[in-house]
Amino acid sequence: MRAELYHKASLGVRVPRGIQGFWDIICALAATQGGFTITDVDRESNVNRQEIKDYVRLLAKAGFLAIETPSRRGPHGLSATVYCLARKQKAAPRLRDDGSVIHATVQENLWTTIRNLKTFGIAELRFGAATEDIKPAYGATRVFVYRLTRAGYLSRLSKGMFRLKPGMDTGPKPPERRAVRAEVMWDPNLRAFVGEPPIAKEVSR
Amino acid sequence: MSTSQHPVQHGPVALENVASFMAMTVRLVDRAPHLPGFGVCHGPSGYGKTYASIYAQNKTKAVRVEVGDSWSRGTLLRAILREYGEAPKGRMPIADMAERCIAVMGDDPHRPLIVDEADKCVDKGFIELVRELQESSGAPVILIGEEKLPTKLLTVERMHNRVLDWFPAQPCGIGDVRTLAKAFVPGVALHDELLEAIRQQSGGRARRVVVNLAHAAEIARNKGLKTLDRRAWGDDSFFTGEPPTPRHVELFQRQPKKVAA
């Protein structure tokens, strides 16, 4: 762990990845060259090709991409499917495995409702956030509110009421829970972590 | 955590105002391109306009800003950009911000912009700016405001004929009170007589209905009741939102000091 490595890693380079990254690449490719193949998308990103492949195929299944008929011959004489953009939008479409679109998540609805109501109880929050396809469960709502309170977004008022701190209304996207793994030095005498802020790795749970 | 105590929420769409607001939103989003793109929702406070806009936001991913009392054109544009995730870093001329606003709104012309407390825009004289944003981008804009909002908009000549739909929020009906009771007093059956009393005493304002329902829930919990009628409510006063009547202070005059003989 040499300091030099960190300096290299903290260069201001951004490689688009994740579905929003793939989608941005696809939109850019569609704007510049029209049709594109999975390899074209792969070239612009640095993740496992399979991830891109899965997402592009789902997009085609959901009708966001159309398949152009004459497929392209690759350098090895293999044919590659050429896709073109059928439906343009800014945010990357979130899709289930069967190709259906995820319009909203429970957390998004809850966060929107919290930002609107400002002061609320769990019952009001659940009522406000419910739509035909999203029905926040009591437990899930409480857990989300509890996490936001612990993270300092909400202040707890009396009688089971909460308020969004005005300074913590950070924007339209809901704060997400992330589990990270990091190596740090803990000093039991000081009861504190000592040293530079560590480089944390995201873990699944 | 039994299911009867925390039933599945059906959401605010069961309220009439929310359903009508959503219908207006859908009409605006799906309108023919040559039709005007403004929708106006007006009504006194506490009629459920906020819940209506929350629902529309959750369904259509609409962007909402609430105009503050101290806002200028710059604050409005910055707030709109922030909601689109495009907040400018540092200072930026108003014209540039407006241009950027129009660009991001035009990128997604099916995503409505909801401007709450829109009467403040008229008062402060930047409703023309909102009109420019709508006209140039083609995205639907919904103005929410107090009861006088339509009258205020009439004074702006170029504004009022660009409104596709006017929607006055209606006071709660008995069906709305029943829906709210199901959501806020779960597991307790409230008699129609009591629901009607709550509706009348609340003046049909959803916010006051909810306060009264919270009181009903408390009574049911304290007395361990599963059904609640007007008698069980007893002589407790309803939350009507009325300010206290003036007291006759002259009746409570100070006694003159007794002088020792």
Image (spheres, rainbow, N blue to C red):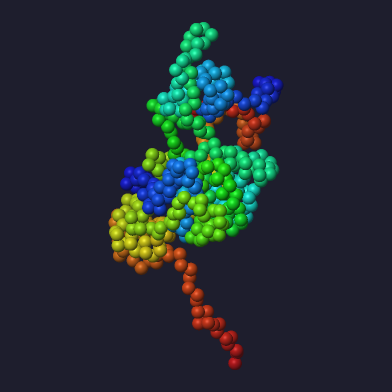
Does the image show residue A150? no
Tell me what residue is drawn at x 48 percent, y 21 percent: A83
Does residue A67 sit above or below B138 in this rendering? above
Tell me what residue is drawn at x 53 percent, y 50 percent: B115
Q: Which residue sits furthest bottom?
A: B261
Viewer-nearest residue: A8 or B224: A8
Tell me what residue is drawn at x 51 percent, y 35 percent: A177
Q: Position of residue A63 (x, y in %)?
A: 43, 27
Does residue A199 sit above or below A165 in this rendering? above
Q: Which corner quadrant of the image does residue A2 belong to?
A: top right
Viewer-nearest residue: A132 or B154: B154
Viewer-nearest residue: A130 or A149: A130
The C terminus of chain B lies in quadrant: bottom right
Does the image show residue B116? yes
Q: Position of residue A54 (x, y in %)?
A: 46, 21
Tell me what residue is drawn at x 57 percent, y 86 percent: B256
The N terminus of chain B lies in quadrant: top left
